[in-house]
C-alpha cells in the first residue's frame, strides 16, 4: 500500500521549462511585426535631453526631464521601500527601459502561447501581420504608408487607439488581442517588476512539503508489449476514467471506498503531474504548464478569454479553494424547469454535504486579506449582502495567495491532495499521465445497443526524445470526466450524436475593476477568494444576475486585465501593484455559446459572445463594485473598459469621505458630485465586446443532463443517452450555469453518478467492502 513520503529538502521550488516547439508560430517577417506591436504595448521608456528624437530613439518612448521626473516620482510612491535611493533609482530606470524585443524570456513565452492558437486563427494572425509588414497593407490597416515596424512608438500607439475606436468589429478585436497578449506576457516575464514592487517570486514562508507518492504507468516499460498487428498497447481494467479533475476524483473515491480491491480503476490524464516540490509554479511558466492551451483560450470572435486546468487534478489543482454549495433557486430551476427532481431532494443535499465533509470545507478559520476585507467592509457600509466564502482546506487557515499556481502547502483538498490518495489507500487505482484519449470504443449487447467497452488514445512520455504509442484500454465501464471543453469532443469523436452535445456552454463571464489604495495592500498575501457579495445575484427574478468577488492577485491574474491607455501609463500602473487590488463582477449567464471540434487538429473551440442581457447584469455589479471601492477610500478606480477614464479621488473628496463614510449604511450617502458624474458616465459607456476584457474560469453545460434524450446528453444518472456503460461526470453535465464556483456542485453531481455506478456493479455481482450486497443497495 502506498504511503506518504517527504519531499527532499529544497530551498526553492523545482523549475519547469516550456515544452519544445514544433516550429515557429509565424514567419520571421511577421514575428518582427508582432514584436514591434509588443514594443508599443510595453515600450522602452527613457529620458531624452533633446526636443526631437533621432531615428534610433523612435523605437522608444522619449520623456522630457519633467516627464521623467514625474514618472520616477510615481514609481517611488508605490514601490517597495528601499534605503538605497541610488540603487532604487537604477531599478526604476531599468524597469522603464526594458523592452519586449530585447527580452528572450518574453519572446519564448509569447511563442509558447501562440503555439496553442488553432491553425485557422494562426493563418488570420499571419495575414494581419503580413499586411502590417508592407506599405499597402499598412496603409489599409493603419492609415500610414510606412510598414508598422518602421513607425515610431508614438505612431504605433496611435494605430492601436485607432483600432480601439474603429467602427469595424475586427479592428477593435485586434486592439483587444494585441494589448492583452502584450500585458499578459509582460507581467509574467519582466525582470524588474518583482524587485520594484517587492513581490516575492516564491512565498516568503515557502518550505519543501510532502506529497502523496503517486505512481504512473509507463508504457515505454518492457512490461508493456505492443500488439504486432495494430501497433497498440492493450491493457485491461474494470473502470476507465478519462480525466483527473474534480469529477474524476470523486468518482474514483466512491468506487474505491465501496469496492476496495475487488474493482480496478484506471485514471487517464492528458496533462502532467507536479508534486509539491514544484509548487507554486513560476509566473513565467505556471499558466503554460497547468492550463489548457497555455492558459489563453480565446473565443472564436475574441470577445472572451477562457482559462481551464490541464494538469493532474484538473481544475482542483489550480482553483482558488472557494467552496460554495448550489443555491436554492438554481436547484429549483433544475428540478422543476428541467424536470430533474433529484436536485431538490435530500439525496442531492447529502451529496453536497458529503463532498464538503470529505474536504473539510469550512469558513471558521478564514482570515480575509486586504482585498477581501474591502468587499466585506464596503458591503456592510452600503447595506449589501456579503459573506465569507468557505474553503476546501480541511479546516486550515490556508494563508496562501499563490494557490492558483499549485498548492505547495498541500492544504487544498482537491483530487491530488484529498480524493485520489484515499482512493489509492482503499482501492485498486492506477494512473496514467500524458494520455490523450481520442475516442470511446463500443461493442453491442444482445439487444444491439451500443455498449462502451473501452477507450483508445495516444500516450506521450514526459521529456524530449520519447516515442508516443497508441494505447487501448478495455473496460467494463467508461467515465468521461475530461471537463466541459473536452468531454463533448471525446463524445463527438466517439460517434455520439445528440443535438445538445457541445451546446449550452455557460462560462460565468466576468468584467474587472482595479483599485489603487494609499496604504500597501500586498495583494499576493492571504487566501485568494474569501468573500462574495450576492445582493445582485437574482436581477431578473429567475436566478440570473451577478456576484462581486476578489481576483487572485498573482501578477499573471491580477495585472493582466488592467486597462491599457499607453505603454508608459501601463508600466506605471503595473508598478502600483503593491498598493493595488483587482475585483470582478461575475454573471450567472442566461445565454449560451457552444463548443465545436477543430477540423484540423481536433481541439475544442469556443464560440461565445457575452449577450446584451448578461453584460447588463455584469454592469450592475461593476457599478456596485465602484461604489464599494469609493467608500473604502480607493485613490484610483480603474474599470477594465477601454476608452473609459479612471476615477481619481481628489484630496478634498478623500478627507471628506473618510469623515462621512465612517458610519455609512447606505449608498445614498455618497454625495461626491465628481464621483456620481463619473459613475453615470460609466453606465453609459457600457461593456460591449470585443474591446472590453471578458474572462472566464468556469465552464459548464456542454453535455447537459436531461430528463429525456431530447432534453440532454446524459440521463439523470449521468449515463449517455443511447448507450450502456458510458457516463459523464464533470461540470459539463450541469443543466445550466451553477451561479457559484462549480467545484462543489460538480463534485456532488459526480458523487450521485458514482453511486448509480456502484448500484449497477452490485447488481452485477461485484462484492462491496465489509458489507453485504443488501447493505450497499440500501446505502446507495
Image (cartoon, grey):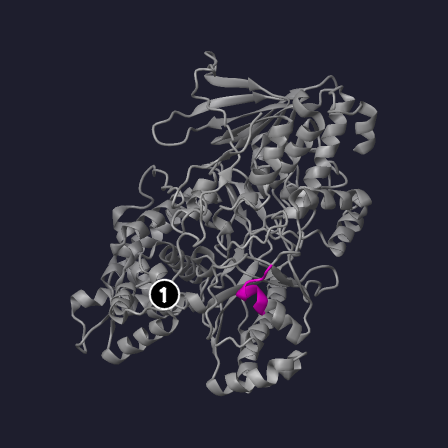
Residue 187: image location, x then y, percent: 38, 58
Horizontal side of residue 556 vs 412, given as left or right: left
Point out residue 486 in the picture as x, y percentages from the top left corner.
55, 39
Write the start and end of the magenta stretch as one range: 367-374
**Where residue 343 sits in the image (x, y, percent)?**
77, 46
Camera-nearest residue between 261 and 435: 261
Quarter of the picture containing the C terminus is: top right
Can residue 775 be seen at all in this image of the molecule? yes
Residue 135 drawn at (x, y percent): 25, 59
* Tag count: 1
Residue visible at 65% across and 28% down in the picture? 426
Residue count near mark 1 (Cα–Cα under 10 Å), binned few <14, some 14–19, many ≥20: many
Determine whether the residue tagged by mark 1 lies in a helix, strand or loop.
helix
Q: Is 148 a magenta residue?
A: no
Q: Main secondary structure of the magenta part?
A: helix
Q: Residue at position x 71%, y 23% from top?
A: 449
Residue at 73% x, 46% y: name it.
Answer: 353
Residue for point 57% across, 37% down: 482
Confirm whether residue 728 shows in the render: no
Q: Which residue is mark 1?
A: 160
Q: In the image as oriented, which residue stretches furthest toward the top?
A: 228
Which corner quadrant holds the N terminus? top right
Amino acid at each position: 500500500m502506498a504511503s506518504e513520503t517527504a519531499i527532499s529538502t529544497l530551498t526553492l521550488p523545482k523549475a519547469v521549462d516550456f515544452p519544445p516547439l514544433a516550429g515557429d508560430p509565424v514567419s520571421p517577417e511577421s514575428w518582427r511585426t508582432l514584436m514591434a506591436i509588443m514594443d508599443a504595448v510595453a515600450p522602452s521608456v527613457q529620458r531624452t535631453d533633446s526636443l526631437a528624437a533621432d531615428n534610433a530613439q523612435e523605437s522608444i518612448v522619449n520623456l522630457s526631464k519633467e516627464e521623467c521626473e514625474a514618472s520616477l516620482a510615481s514609481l517611488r510612491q508605490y514601490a517597495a521601500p528601499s534605503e538605497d535611493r541610488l540603487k532604487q533609482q537604477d531599478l526604476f530606470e531599468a524597469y522603464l527601459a526594458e523592452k519586449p524585443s530585447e527580452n528572450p524570456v518574453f519572446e519564448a513565452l509569447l511563442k509558447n502561447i501562440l503555439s496553442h492558437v488553432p491553425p485557422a486563427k494562426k493563418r488570420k494572425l499571419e495575414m494581419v501581420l503580413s499586411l502590417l509588414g508592407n506599405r499597402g497593407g499598412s496603409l489599409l490597416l493603419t492609415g500610414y504608408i510606412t510598414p508598422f515596424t518602421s513607425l515610431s512608438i508614438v505612431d504605433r500607439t496611435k494605430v492601436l487607439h485607432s483600432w480601439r475606436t474603429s467602427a469595424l468589429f475586427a479592428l477593435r478585436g485586434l486592439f483587444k488581442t494585441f494589448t492583452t497578449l502584450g500585458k499578459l506576457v509582460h507581467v509574467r516575464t519582466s525582470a524588474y517588476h518583482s524587485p520594484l514592487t517587492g513581490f516575492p517570486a516564491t512565498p516568503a514562508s515557502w518550505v519543501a512539503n510532502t506529497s502523496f507518492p503517486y505512481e504512473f504507468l509507463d508504457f515505454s516499460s518492457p512490461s508493456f508489449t505492443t500488439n504486432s498487428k495494430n501497433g497498440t498497447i492493450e491493457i485491461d481494467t474494470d473502470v476507465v476514467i478519462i480525466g483527473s479533475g474534480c469529477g474524476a476524483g470523486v468518482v474514483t473515491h466512491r468506487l474505491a471506498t465501496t469496492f476496495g480491491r475487488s474493482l480496478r480503476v484506471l485514471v487517464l490524464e492528458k496533462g502532467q503531474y507536479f508534486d509539491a516540490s514544484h509548487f507554486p509554479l513560476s509566473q513565467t511558466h505556471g499558466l503554460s504548464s497547468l492550463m489548457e492551451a497555455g492558459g489563453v483560450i480565446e473565443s472564436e470572435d475574441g470577445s472572451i478569454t477562457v482559462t481551464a486546468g490541464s494538469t493532474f487534478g484538473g481544475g482542483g489543482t489550480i482553483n482558488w479553494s472557494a467552496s460554495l454549495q448550489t443555491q436554492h433557486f438554481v436547484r429549483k430551476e433544475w428540478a422543476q424547469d428541467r424536470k430533474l427532481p433529484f436536485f431538490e431532494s435530500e439525496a442531492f443535499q447529502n451529496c453536497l454535504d458529503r463532498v464538503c465533509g470529505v474536504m473539510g470545507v469550512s469558513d471558521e478559520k478564514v482570515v480575509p486579506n486586504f482585498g477581501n476585507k474591502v468587499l466585506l467592509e464596503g458591503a456592510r457600509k452600503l447595506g449589501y449582502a456579503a459573506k465569507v466564502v468557505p474553503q476546501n482546506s480541511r479546516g486550515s487557515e490556508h494563508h496562501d495567495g499563490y494557490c492558483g499556481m499549485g498548492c505547495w502547502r498541500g492544504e487544498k483538498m482537491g483530487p491530488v491532495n484529498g480524493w485520489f490518495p484515499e482512493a489509492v489507500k482503499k482501492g485498486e487505482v492506477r494512473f496514467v499521465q500524458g494520455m490523450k484519449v481520442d475516442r470511446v470504443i463500443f461493442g453491442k449487447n444482445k439487444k444491439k445497443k451500443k455498449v462502451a467497452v473501452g477507450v483508445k488514445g495516444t500516450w506521450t512520455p514526459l521529456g524530449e526524445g520519447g516515442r508516443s504509442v497508441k494505447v487501448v484500454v478495455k473496460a467494463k465501464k467508461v467515465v468521461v470526466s475530461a471537463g466541459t471543453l473536452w468531454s463533448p469532443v471525446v463524445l463527438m469523436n466517439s460517434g455520439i450524436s445528440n443535438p445538445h452535445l457541445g451546446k449550452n456552454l455557460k462560462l460565468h463571464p466576468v468584467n474587472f475593476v482595479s483599485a489603487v489604495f494609499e496604504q500597501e495592500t500586498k495583494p499576493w498575501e492571504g487566501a485568494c477568494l474569501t468573500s462574495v457579495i450576492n445582493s445582485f445575484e437574482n436581477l431578473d427574478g429567475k436566478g440570473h444576475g451577478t456576484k462581486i468577488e476578489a481576483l487572485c492577485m498573482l501578477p499573471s491574474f491580477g495585472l493582466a486585465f488592467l486597462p491599457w491607455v499607453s505603454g508608459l501609463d501601463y508600466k506605471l500602473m503595473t508598478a502600483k501593484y503593491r498598493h493595488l487590488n483587482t475585483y470582478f463582477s461575475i454573471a450567472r449567464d442566461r445565454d449560451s455559446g457552444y463548443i465545436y471540434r477543430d477540423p484540423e487538429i481536433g481541439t475544442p473551440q469556443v464560440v461565445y459572445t457575452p449577450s446584451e442581457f448578461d453584460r447588463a447584469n455584469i454592469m450592475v455589479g461593476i457599478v456596485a463594485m465602484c461604489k464599494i471601492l469609493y467608500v473604502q477610500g480607493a485613490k484610483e478606480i480603474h474599470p477594465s473598459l477601454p476608452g473609459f477614464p479612471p476615477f481619481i479621488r481628489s484630496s478634498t473628496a478623500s478627507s471628506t469621505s473618510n469623515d462621512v463614510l465612517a458610519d455609512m449604511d447606505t449608498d445614498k450617502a455618497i454625495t461626491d458630485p465628481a464621483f456620481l458624474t463619473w459613475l453615470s458616465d460609466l453606465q453609459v459607456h457600457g461593456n460591449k465586446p470585443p474591446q472590453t476584457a471578458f474572462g472566464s474560469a468556469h465552464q459548464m453545460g456542454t453535455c447537459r443532463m436531461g430528463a429525456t434524450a431530447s432534453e440532454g446528453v446524459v440521463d439523470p444518472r449521468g449515463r449517455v443517452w443511447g448507450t450502456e456503460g458510458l457516463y459523464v461526470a464533470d461540470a459539463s453535465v450541469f443543466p445550466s450555469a451553477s451561479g457559484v464556483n462549480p467545484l462543489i456542485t460538480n463534485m456532488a453531481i459526480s458523487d450521485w453518478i458514482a453511486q448509480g455506478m456502484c448500484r449497477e456493479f452490485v447488481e452485477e455481482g461485484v462484492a462491496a467492502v465489509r458489507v453485504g450486497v443488501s447493505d450497499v443497495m440500501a446505502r446507495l
